[in-house]
Amino acid sequence: MKELPARPFQRVLVANRGEIALRVVRACRDAGLHSLAVFADGDAGAPYVDAASEAMALGGVTAAETYLDASKLLDAARRLRAEAVHPGYGFLAEDAAFAQAVIDAGLVWIGPPPEVIRLLGDKVAARQLAESVGVRVVAGTAEPVAGEAGVEAFVAAHGLPVVIKAAHGGGGRGMRVVRRERDVATLWAMAVGEATAAFGRPECFVERFVERARHVEVQLLADTHGAVMVAGDRDCTVQRRHQKLIEEAPAPFLDDAQRAALHESALAIGRAAGYIGAGTVEFLLDPTGALSFLEVNCRLQVEHPVTEEVSGLDLVRAQLTIAAGGHVPSLVAVGPLRHAIELRLTAEDPANGFAPSSGTLRTFRMPSGPGVRVDAGVRTGTVVGEQFDSLLAKLIVAGADRAEVLARARRALAETAVEGVATSLPFLRAVVEHKAFTGDNGAPFTMHTGWVEETPPGELGADVTVEGDGTVEVLVGGRWLRVAVPGLTTVAPNVLAEARRRPDDAHRPAAVTDAVVVPMQSTVVVLHVADGEYVNAGDPVGVVEAMKMQHLLVAPNDGVVSGLAVGVGASVAGGTVLCRVVAKELS
């Protein structure tokens, strides 16, 4: 396998944005290197741009016009006289073609070799590699499937539920769980569409879905001299839409045998792949305690700070050192020094199925004090748009043990204040108090990757009570507010139950009406119905896309579609009524 060019460098292009770009800029400054930022039009005043040694406009608004445009990034690298490129995470961080183009341009790629990215970025090939070194995988297709017929064939052989996954990329995008055969076509189309939009590759494969699993992972560091080390493990079970919201290190509630198996499996996969740089091997832990391989992320993880806080390592500095031909660093001590939890503050509305929220941050006040670290990509006055990921900041809390960290997390979240957009803050406050997460006072740790969707809104920091007078009573920041909802009607309990049973493609309604409402500023990408068409409660109506995520809108009740006024490609504001489903018996 061709080794990465390893040589000293002084000027690093940061091919990303937001909090991770600022994180890399800071690591470069600590290492005495010049950081070179690039930015889309809307990021011109971002904190990472101000902090960088130099910055250059890419010219454009969307991700496709900027951070996903390899030619623009390489041109910026040339004009800024960069000697190396750090891709951060997301965008082109796991794009083997971009990594190769960087190397071909005579620059140092701060990441794994293109051959490794290509191998492990193909999730089907990664599964095969894991099996070859004796690591367990769940049943899945040997190749990407050609279409919905391939999903149906897998269901016929293995039963439900199954999960459709993008074969390239990660972060929970291009992933849909199928629980009913009639949903295969719709969810297949959504997975393919989202995979194409996020990664530029439509291929998807199918696996058996592991119910009530925990998500655990291992941080690897490997250098060009053949050394591969485990830098720690993490739990990332608290998720919505298969995307992480809370992570902690070390992974709690594992026995010694499970932890040893995690580390040994990750090392075996990393060595077999010829891994170089920082990477993460992810696993599922099922309710019986059995581990199965999930995927490898060939990049820095969003949750890397918790490993830094417990190990004493600077993982970004380690990436820079390895790329320059240095050795993996030594751990300060054997095993973790302490405990840490990361809480992701996102521009999303927990009361509306975590629908993305956009607007201007009128207030952005983050906590401080003992054991508190904040990695933020925004500040007061930042305009949060719909073009990019919803992550605003990461609150990392560390302490001597899990009990101390939970106490500090509660204090830190109480000090946090954000105004101007809906955020995950009330959800985070609720979780660090919830017995399913704390696992204290004799209560078991009962978290699993579907817990958020199964838990009533009132336990997630977003209570909504429907009243008979056309209003809803909403709990916001500890205060009950009554809000009028035009067209509010009652609905049979089975309709609400059905919506809750479909957490992967339907928003939990805050109030029930006959209107199909677009939950956030977004673009209509698919329409499944036409005016006058009869639909049943829970049937797909349309798909909208915002902040790189697609969201399926479903019929709230049985009836006839009426007032469909927008078409595919239309940009619609949050709260727009896409159509109504007028109750009517099918004759």
Image: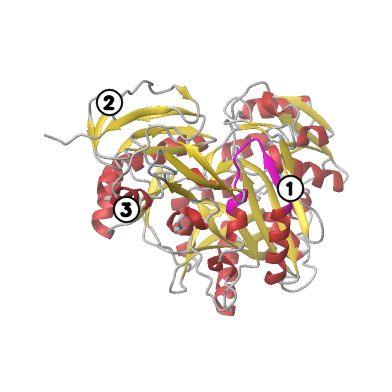
Q: Residue shown at 45%/46% (left/top)?
A: 167
Which tag, 1 or 3, sits closer to the chain's start? Answer: 3
Q: Is residue 71 left or right of residue 541?
A: right
Q: Is residue 315 left or right of residue 53?
A: left
Which tag, 2 or 1, sits closer to the chain's start? Answer: 1
Q: Is residue 336 magenta?
A: no
Viewer-proximal residue among 335 and 127: 335
Q: Is residue 111 left or right of residue 499?
A: right
Q: Is residue 419 magenta?
A: yes
Task: Calculate the distance from the C-alpha at mark 3 to the C-alpha at mark 2.
Answer: 25 Å
Judged by depth in the image, the label closer to the viewer, 3 or 2, is: 2
Task: Give the secondary structure at mark 3.
Answer: loop
Q: Residue shown at 32%/30% (left/top)?
A: 580
Q: Is residue 195 depicted above or below 460 in this figure?
A: above
Which tag, 3 or 2, sits closer to the chain's start? Answer: 3
Q: Position of residue 365 (x, y in %)?
A: 75, 44
Please tell me how crowded label 1 is: few (under 14), some (14-19), or many (20+) other residues with Cα within 10 Å: some
Q: Is residue 181 depicted above or below 547 in this figure?
A: below
The residue labelled by disc 2 is 530
Identify the amino acid type marked 1: Asp
Does the residue at mark 2 contact the one at mark 1 (Cβ under 8 Å)?
A: no
Q: Position of residue 243 (x, y in %)?
A: 53, 50
Task: Calculate the distance from the C-alpha at mark 1 to the C-alpha at mark 3.
Answer: 37 Å
Identify the amino acid type marked 2: Ala
Identify the magenta region: 415-427
Q: Position of residue 412 (x, y in %)?
A: 73, 56
| Residue 179 badge | 3
Q: Residue shown at 62%/38% (left/top)?
A: 100
Task: Give the secondary structure at mark 2.
Answer: loop
The residue labelled by disc 1 is 375
